[in-house]
Structure formats: C-alpha cells, structure tokens
Amino acid sequence: MSINSAMLAGVSGLIANSSALAAISDNIANVNTVAYKRNQVNFANVVTAQAVQGRYSAGGVQGVTHSYVSQQGLIQSAGSTTDMAISGDGFFVVTQKGAGLTPSDTREFTRSGQFNVDASGYLVNNSGLYLQGWPAQAGGTFTVDPSDLTKLNSINVKNLGAAVQASTNVGISANLDETGVISPGEATYVATSNTSMADFANGAATGTKPDFTMDMNITDSVGGSRKVELAFLKSSTNPNEWHAEIYSVPASNVAVAAGTRPGQIGAGLVKFNPDGSINLATTTLFGAAGATPQIALSASAGAVPAWSTALGLQAQTVSLDITKMTQYASNSTVTSISNDGAGVGNIVGVQVDAHGVVSAIYDNSQVRKIAKVAVATFPNADALKSVSGNAYQISIPAGQMVLKDPGTGGAGQISPSSLEASTVDLSSEFTGLISTQKAYSASSKIITTADTMLNELINIIR
C-alpha cells in the first residue's frame, strides 16, 4: 500500500539521518585527535519495483558510510623528538604489545605518530600501540622486506647498553718552526740506534730529546684512552727534513718487534716542500716513501706492533690526516687535533630523521642507529577496517599491503618532530549538523502525515 510505503520511507530517512548524525558527532568529538580521518554518511535512494501501473510505492533512502582515510591532514610542528608524521601516502605499522610478538599477533596501521618512550623503552603512541620497524644490522644497515610483517620488531630505545667508538681517524693541524736551530743531540741520534726519542719519553738517559712533540689520545676498542706521541727532531741534512717517531706513552701499552725501541710504533723522516707544505710522497715515517699515514696495531696475539697482551684489545688501524702540517718560519705549535673516537657513553636522547631512522644519542656525542620505521601502503586505503585507537586493520577491498622505505616507491616521507592534524573541518561539520537535523525533522513529518492519512482511512468504516 502506498501509505505504508511512505511511512517506511520516512522511517528509512530517520535511520539514515541518525547514522549521519552519529558520523558527524564522531568527527566533532575527534577534532583534536592526532591524524584522525573524518567519516561521512552519504545517501543513496532505494527503488521499489512498481507492481501496479498507476500506483507508486516509495523505496526510501539508505546511508552509505565513507571513511576518508587517504586524506592528508595538516603537518604541524611538535615539541618531542619522538613525534613523527607521514607526509604523503602510507601508515605506521603498530601492534598491541611490545615483546614476544608472534606471526599470529595482529598488526595494525595508523597515522597517529605521537610516540613516547614507555617504562620498558618501547615507542608507544597515545593509544598504547607499539611502533614497528626494521632493526639495524651490523654496520648500521637495514634488511628491508616489502611484504613480511614478521621481519619488523617493536622499536626499543633503552635496551642498548653503552656506546664506544674506537678511533679510526685523527686529523692534525700543526706547524714546525723552519727557523729552529739544530739540536746538539741530532748528530748522535743519526749515528746511534739506541738514542731514540721514544727512549727519552720513557726516561732513558740515552734518549734524545725531541725539538717538538704532539700528544694524541686514541680511544681503544673498549673505550679506554691511550696516549700516543708524535715527536720531531730537525735534521741537519736537509732544511726541509725532520726526524720523526711515533711511540706509546707508556711504552708498556704496545708490544714491538725485537730490536725496536720500547713503545716505538714508527720512525722515519717527515719532509716538506720549499713552500712549507708537507711532502707525503717522500715522507718515510709510516714505512716506505709515500706510504699511507696510519698507525696499525694488531690484536694482542697478532703481529707487531700490537697492543700489549695484558690489555686484551682488538686490532686497530688509525688513519692520520697530516696534510695540514706545515713548516713555516713561525713557532712550532699545534693548531688542532681531531679524533673520531669516543669513550663509554650512555643514552641521553632519541631522534628520528626524515628517512625514518630511529637513533639513540649518547653523552659521548655518538649516535647509534636502532631501527628504520616501515611505511605500509595500500591501493585503496579508504577501504581499511577501522578499529579503536585511531588505527586500521587489513581488509580485502583495501588491496595488498606493501612495506616501503619512507619516501620511496610512492610512500610518504617521515616528518620528524611533527604531528598530523585531524582532517575534521568544524564549519563543514556544523553545517552538516544543521542540514541533518532538518532532514530528520522532515522524515518524521512524513510519518506523522502518513499516520493521519491512515486514521482517515480507518474512520471511513465508522
């Protein structure tokens, strides 16, 4: 009956507009929720087959919910170094627990990047979801897998221990006085093998006092500081030539070959050009002329020179950049000595870069990579299944998930110390609120009108 169909159409209007009101209410309530994506109920008409010609039966309306998951929110600056946002396509991979993950544990996806370090050291967002990433391998590399979620681990920034960086490079900027007088002991130094500058450093009476020394502190494999001295004695043979030695202080730190003076790592000549610049091609301090400037110390059980067995240290090669050494008519002086080594350090902070690499910062200025944040993309992100905590789960209509490096293959870039704002526009939501209220009132009017008509029909038989 047409009146009944009209009443049912009015009921469908009430139901559809109630759903629209619920979606608007959710949007307004989450206007300040980080990375919240607005929902909208769209309306579609329902057509009833007309069984009798000349009569019309109303079908009504149905509400179809659409989630604008792929809509980009405004990226805003945040105060925490562990906050992050995705600028572009993709989602953070998260789980509901940090430790003991198994393949059966549900992986969820979110754009809510307001992460903090919890008591156990895990990066957790405000919904209690644990951030997942590819763990750093030896050497700071990452093994990236585009489809295997089990290759990701919960990112923990505390259970790393202390950091040590053994010295590998030392840079020296110094000047040797070209006008310096020849030391009286230089002739004896040349003529006698046991009058080394290394002997003088060890307090031997037969040692030769250098004209100038430079102290270098080298960090060993366990974070200890080992003093190495570079000594110079002006040569009487050539005005652009200096006798030079490298030796350990104390000598007991280093084992040397038989016949080598105690603690002496290297000995030879350092030569300069007429313009005062160093001539590495003819310098013999590091072995043959033109040899690479470096200090090579074997492990305790290795070939000499080596660290003393009592120290139990790893083998170590330290490259020396002496290209900034000069011989000018000015006092001998050290301008600077740089060293890339660092002693034992503890974690004082965490940072995330634009490539999604999470690193720990130590109080010895070292930065250690921990993990790389994975960005998950979907062909149809709007079809993902919404779950509590401003997160989503995989669904068939969303398509095949792919894990990508941030900023590659169409995945969005990571914006460090930033957060994505909600996509809710209050002006649009309030406008929709008014129109939904009016539509609901109109639908209720259909029902009351149909009720009045049915009463008239009933009254016919009275």
Image (cartoon, rainbow, N blue to C red):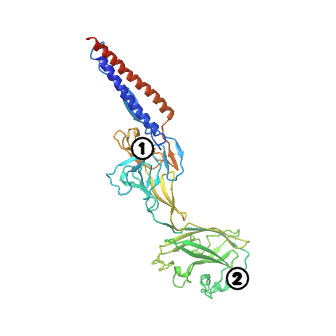
**Toward the viewer: 409 or 311?**
311
Instruction: State the residue at coordinates (59%, 71%).
Output: 290
Secondary structure of the residue carrying numbered label 1: loop
Residue 141: numbered disc: none
Residue furthest to the front in view is 462
Q: Is residue 103 left or right of residue 304?
A: left
Q: Amino acid at mark 1?
A: Asn
Instruction: State the residue at coordinates (47%, 33%).
Output: 429
- The answer to whether residue 58 is seen in the rendering is no
Say which quarter of the image contains residue 231.
Answer: bottom right
**Toward the viewer: 227 or 279?**
227
Residue 402 in percent (x, y) is at 39, 46
Crowdedness of circle 2 by 10 Å Cα count: few (<14), some, many (20+)?
some
- The answer to whether residue 316 is seen in the rendering is yes
* Residue marked by disc 1: 390
Crowdedness of circle 1 by 10 Å Cα count: few (<14), some, many (20+)?
many
**Toward the viewer: 25 or 379?**
25
Residue 183: numbered disc: 2
Say which quarter of the image contains residue 279.
Answer: bottom right
- From the viewer's perspective, is residue 139 above or below residue 298? above
Q: Is residue 454 left or right of residue 36?
A: left
Q: Quadrant of the C terminus?
A: top left
Q: CA distance from mark 1 to mark 2?
A: 79 Å
Residue 336 in percent (x, y) is at 64, 68
